[in-house]
Image (spheres, helix red, strand yellow):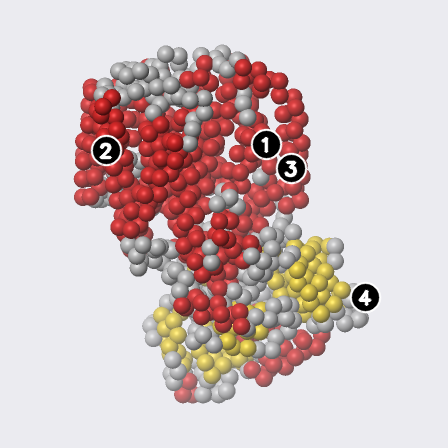
Amino acid sequence: MSTPHRSPRRPGLLGSALAALVTVVAVGAGDAVARVFPYGPRHRSINDLGNQFVPFHAHLWDLLHGRAGGGLLLNWQSGYGTSFLPDFGTYLTSPFAVLVGLFPRQDIDLAVYVVTVLKTAAAAAAMAWLLRTQRRGPVWAAGLLGASYALCGWSVIEASYNPMWLDGLIAFPLLCLTGEWALRARRPAAAVVVVALCWTANFYTAYMATLGAVLVLLVRLLLTREGAGARVRVLARAALTTLLGVALSMPVLLPLFLSSKQAYPGWFKPFVPVATEDLLARLLPATYSFSSPALFVGTGTLLLVAALPFHRAVHGRERLVWTGLVLLVLLSFQWMPTHLAWHLFATPNGSPYRQTFALAGIVVMAAWAGLSAGPPRPWALAGGAAVLAAVLLAASGSRLATPWGLALFGGGLALAGAAWWALRHRRLVLPAAAVLGLVLLAQAAATTAHGERGKLAGLDDYPVWGAAHTARADALKGAEGWPAYRTDAGRPALTGNDPMLLGGEGGAYYSSHTPDLFTRTMVALGAGWTSRGRNVQSLDNPVTDAVFSVGARLRPDGTIARAEVPPLVTVRPPGAQPAYGASPFANQELLLGARVYEDPLSPGVCRAGTEAFLSAPEYNGTARLADGPAFRLNANPPRNRAALQPLGVSNGLPSQLVFDAPAPAHWQLSCLDRSRLSTAVTALRASAATSVRVTSAGVRAELPPGTTGTAVLAAPAIAGWTCNDRPATSRLGLVAIPLDGRTTVVTCTFRPPGLGAGLAVAGAALMALIVFLRATRPVARDGRRNAPPISRQGVLKGHARCP
């Protein structure tokens, strides 16, 4: 055995730099092998990455460069005006997100990819730093274990296309670090700031990371020789700094929570535990599934953990506690109550094992606990290898196991076992470390590549910014007339958030915060949706365009269709409060305030000269007028709802409606008279606001003197609108302001619900932190002078040997 390694007073940057480097190389190699963007022709933007996250980062780019419609509180570009702070807090509050502003806007896909890789590398660096803070050990090993954590299967398969989840991957080691500071009674202010940053960056995964960090802190306390009083004080310090940190993030979190409650209901899949062979198969590299936890962390790391129970150089209690924690957390994935506890007591929409990164981090820390006492002896390695061989045998019966995965696991096990054995000889340390690094690189790159191919085969994908995007964006920019009228990006859409990605102020909107009121209002008017109602599509209809002041609309051929429309604020005459019915055509007329549709002359035939519109929300197929082109309606209830479809101008009997597939059970054809619509628009313009000024958080409109009835702002009446110092009312789902004949100016401002209370909570937390720091300053100084045994070694005295 060589001389015990002496860890420096500070963990140092070398291990973190190594971890980040290995991570970047592995991710890049895996993506290059899969030939996905930016290394090949295959699209990387699958599912929500292309449909939500890239457009949201494009909107952030616009905000950073002063080009966005709206501000941090209100997004004028999407959904005809919607709250932005909850979206900002869900998708964009990571400190890394602002880096997209350094790239050209047309390179937004590359910018998001770079941010994703940097987040993964930062998680590796943070874990390596944590390991060296917890206890002594070789720098290179901390680097490889940090990379093993960041390259876990959950990271490279699931979080890689949900960039905000990677903030949780970074948060877990950082929150564990605040636990280490609580153990030493050090850095309370820094701990509060770290917690606040983690919870602000992404509260959802930060919650899971906090649960994992609590478990790690409890293990660390169990392994100290401190008395019960000292342990209670540690827990109190940790709890206080965590509560203060979370409270500081409330200006973002509270509006986000309230917005989630007002969102259109998502899809919830019942929890079903994974079969044991499938669970074990996910420990292998090159496996893919979104219905089971991606447990891969690298065979070298797994071998250290499997050998830990047999590693006699580690104190028996420490072996028992760390091994028990790994097994208990793994079992918690399979039990409904603990499954719910990990996910804020709500079954996730989609991937049901979003907490897997916390287990990966615990596995890495357990491996470090064994290695810090020195490399496992041959018999301990043999015991660990036997355990993993049993895992390999059981996993081989799973449908998830691949030949490449089995081969990489078996070969990696043999090489890692030899390398860990070789570390007992000083002259072999460098080649052994190189072998361990190569094993991790090969397995992680293979897992990355396999995951990319699996996602492309099973999920929707969206093209990176190209000529089609540029052409559409240029056309929209050339037609811009906001706030005199809106410009809509039109259909068919490139993504669910084309207004943010391409420009304009359209009706399309896709978010976890899509308001229930907005979805139901648009559906009543005939709009379609995907993602079970949270991805509301633009509605291509001249009546709704008039209502929402859409004066320019992009057509599929790249041209702009223009129309005379009323301004954003119009006036409806006094009368009873109307309510929507079953017919989207009648609902549109109700909102417009005029009859503009005709019933067909006979079933399926509109009068010559009128425009035929088909409502068949559950129809999946094409429909057409007999003498016209076919149009696709995409319904797949309850996931997709087909939008109201324009079929063209009718020629009378020759334009009989034809379904090219079996007709749906429920459909309606109606015939728009353009002359009636023009008359209705003229009437609305005559009584509308004479001047409209839009700000980043509201509207100011001037009305003709003596106006009575109800002023209507062409924006959804979501919670948060205040008009003339009173909460706004709603008329058929739009913001409404009663008029008494004396009001000549209407001023409406939007403030996300919960923002004021969140600011108050954060202010109180800041004051409490100042008081706490003043009260504990002498205690913190004494704590540094008289640190307990845990602060020097992190384990029981006499068991911190390493090569």
The CA span between labels 1 and 2 is 45 Å
Residue 396 vs residue 468, the one in the foreground: 468
Write down the residue under mark 4.
742
| Position in image of residue 685 (x %, y %) | 67, 76
Instruction: Determine the image quadrant of residue 631.
Output: bottom left
Q: Nearer the viewer, mark 1 or mark 2?
A: 2
Give amino acid for label 4: Arg
Residue positioned 62% across, 50% down in the render:
752
Assess whether mark 4 and mark 1 are in contact (beta carbons under 8 angstroms): no
Corner quadrant of residue 543: bottom right
Q: Identify the mark nearer the N-term, 2 or 3.
A: 2
Comparing 649 with 791, the one in front is: 791
Could you tell whether 802 is left or right of 184 in the image? left
Going by the numbered disc 3, the residue's amino acid type is Val
Q: Quickly name the residue at label 2.
A: 435
Residue contact at pointers 1 and 3, CB within 8 angstroms: no
Q: Which residue is mark 1?
A: 244
**Marked residue nearer the N-terminal end (1 or 3):** 1
Left or right of 124? Residue 380 is: left
Marked residue nearer the N-terminal end (1 or 4): 1
Nearest to N terminus: mark 3 or mark 4: 4
Give the mark nearest the N terminus, 1 or 2: 1
Label 2 sits on a secondary structure element that is helix
Quarter the N terminus occupies: top left
